[in-house]
Amino acid sequence: MKYTYITAIMISLASLTSCQDELTTEPVGALTLEQANSKPTLASVESSVTSSYDMLSNKLNQLAEWDWNGGLVFQNDIVIDDIASDDMEKKWSPDGDQPWMDEINNFTFTSTNGGPNGLWKYDYEGIKRTNIALSFLLNEDIEKITGITTERKNQLIGEAYFLRSYYYFSLVTNFGDVPLLLSPVKTYQEAFDLAVRAPKETVWSQIKTDLEKAKSLLPNSKYGSDTEKWRVSKGAAIALLAKTALYNKDWTGVTTLVSELEATGFFSLDANYFDNFSTEYADNEVIFSYNHVKQADPRKGNGICAPLGWGFFAPSDDFLASFEPNDPRKLYTVNAPQQWVNKLLGTTDGSNKGDDDASNNKVLIRYADVLLWKAEALNETGDYSGAISIINQIRTRARNTVTVDGTPVPAGTLPDRGASTDKATIKNWLISERRAELGFENQRMPDLKRWGIAKQVMTAHGKNFQDKHMLYPIPQSEVDASAGLLKQNPGY
């Protein structure tokens, strides 16, 4: 058997009864628990953490070879967060290619759909890797065994805690209650015992605990490493703590944490909106991203650019119509006449389209998004002027960004929002601003769900969104592999 990781509990329960669903790609650079126990070296410790980042990337075929139906060709966040929303269509020209994506788009998907299946496997593979890394790093003798310094050990522990929390954040927001694994699974019996869903409140608590630890361990600097700027930073931990507070409606927590991040002085809005997507770690705004690298061995290119060459990922008419006149963010997001999704390509001239080894980074957290969390929290707590001020800060940067052709935007573009004490009005301004600012960045559907307006918006968009769609189904293969211990979400 090849190395497998089909189930939620890290070792392949499916292998107890069948090898038919076994994944076919040996994960390059990933460390097994057996290797961890038998070869505890400085290199293996470093590798255990570095490989834990990979499930965030857009690299192609990390877990299988062209398993489209299983949702394993690339990370599926774009499918379940953007194609599912009112912002994106599967392709520029409708066709029968990859019908599982159409099922996500029109809300006819079932528990066998590749979208939730792929996301589940990516996230739990990431968790498995972080748990192996932590099993090394928390060994009280690891410094003596490997020669790692205390400073480096603490940084790697902080990174692993952050990454585990990031993967669990994805799981709990998309599936609700999920199995909670905090150490490597060593026996089949242990695996079966853990094949149960922990209450989402417990998962959220663990996310917060991991992030607090990460925050205390990571270097007090903008970058976790001056030579590897892609590594998790203290700012990323603070930001994800703030996002955790946001999703739990802890408005005071949001404002406190974002204010703490602001006080570090590490981040600010870029003068040019598109610098977030075209610049390699020389911008001011990106807090956390995946570092895609061209011509690396093993390959680390941004594979999401490949399906763009096949006609995937088109804007909906409603998304294009939602921008205010002359907003330069519209063309920086997507050039509809040319069918260039600029934000995903990292270019504005169509280059990288069709390139499965492109070098543009995948932005995961950026400062504008974080500031808008604070605006939302301020509005919810009655600081209306504070909320409007932040919204106007985002609009000011947008209107001061030169257009794609290098010319200033026309006078009067994106005027400041006026004074208001009407919470609903300000909330609508915020919703509009987030859609324009963060389009195609995997934020739209999660936003609609946490605001409680997903059904209303999607119904107006002509989609058959039902109450059950607030969560995705647990992959049926996982339910079956657990012999029914893993219970399905209602309605699926």
Image (cartoon, rainbow, N blue to C red):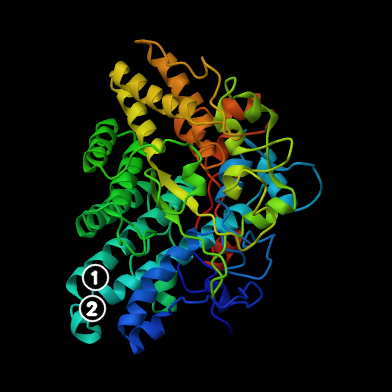
What percent of the width, then of the height, locates residue 444?
Answer: 53, 36
Is residue 83 found left or right of 482 in the rendered image?
A: right
Q: Which secondary structure lies at badge 1? A: helix
Is residue 335 found left or right of 244 in the rendered image?
A: right
Task: Residue at 30%, 62% (x, y): give it.
Answer: 225
Q: Residues within 10 Å of mark 1 (few under 14, many from 20)?
A: some
Quadrant in the picture for residue 82: top right
Vertical placement of 442 versus 434: above or below? below
Vertical placement of 10 versus 407: above or below? below
Disc 1 marks which amino acid?
Answer: Arg
Identify the residue under disc 2.
148
Q: Residue furthest right?
A: 95
Q: Residue furthest front?
A: 407
What percent of the width, then of the height, locates residue 329?
Answer: 55, 32
**Is there any visible trace of residue 112 in the rendered image?**
no
What percent of the width, then of the height, locates residue 391?
Answer: 40, 24
Task: Residue at 46%, 70% (x, y): give it.
Answer: 10
The mark tally for this picture is 2
Question: Which mark, residue 152?
Answer: 1
Disc 2 marks which amino acid?
Answer: Ile
Question: Which mark, residue 259?
Answer: none
Is residue 43 found left or right of 409 in the rendered image?
A: left
Task: Residue at 60%, 75% (x, y): give it.
Answer: 25
Nearer-the-camera pick, 322 or 124: 322
Q: Residues within 10 Å of mark 2 (few under 14, many from 20)?
A: some
Q: Which secondary structure lies at badge 2? A: loop
Is residue 291 found left or right of 410 in the rendered image?
A: left
**Is there any visible trace of residue 296 in the rendered image?**
yes
Nearer-the-camera pick, 436 or 253: 436
* C-beta proximity under 8 Å, tags 1 and 2: yes
Quadrant in the picture for residue 250: top left
Tell me the distance, in whole angstroms, between the alpha carbons under discs 1 and 2.
7 Å
